[in-house]
Image (cartoon, rainbow, N blue to C red):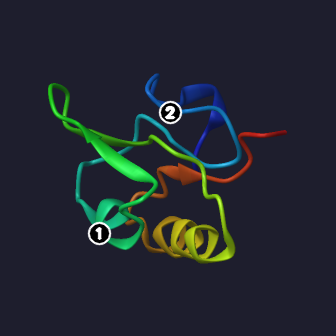
Amino acid sequence: MADKEDKNPENVGGEFYVDSQCIDCDLCRETAPNNFTREDDEGYSYVYKQPENDEEREQCVEAMEGCPVEAIGEDGAE
């Protein structure tokens, strides 16, 4: 389970985030390319844009559910 206290610093504020457990597998970037991108120097993903519509939100949830190391969380807005 992702830890909002361990978010990657590049995440934009809001509900979804990626924490330091990310293994750079590319699944989230492929599943929700409008919301996730890669930090090239360190090799991990982060949320660069929070979902703005139902389709983007569904893609973010799909990415979160498919993450092999559970590095994506959706409790960042709490």
Position of residue 15 measured from the top left corner of the image (x, y, whole percent): 70, 47
Q: Residue at x 59, y 70 (%)?
A: 61
- Dot 2 falls on a residue whose secondary structure is loop
Residue 33 appears left or right of 11 = left
Position of residue 35 measured from the top left corner of the image (x, y, whole percent): 46, 54
Q: Is residue 63 above or below residue 23?
A: below
Residue 46 appears left or right of 50 = left
State the separation of the CA atoms marked 2 and 1: 17 Å
Position of residue 65 measured from the top left corner of the image (x, y, whole percent): 53, 72
N-terminal of the two: label 2 or label 1? Answer: 2
The residue at the far left in this view is: 41
Q: Residue at x 29, y 69 (%)?
A: 30
Q: Residue at x 30, y 67 (%)?
A: 27
Q: Which residue is mark 1?
A: 30
What residue type is disc 2 on?
Answer: Asn
* Foreground residue among 75 and 68: 75
Q: Which residue is mark 2?
A: 11
Quadrant containing the C terminus is top right
- Dot 1 falls on a residue whose secondary structure is helix
Position of residue 64 measured from the top left corner of the image (x, y, whole percent): 52, 65
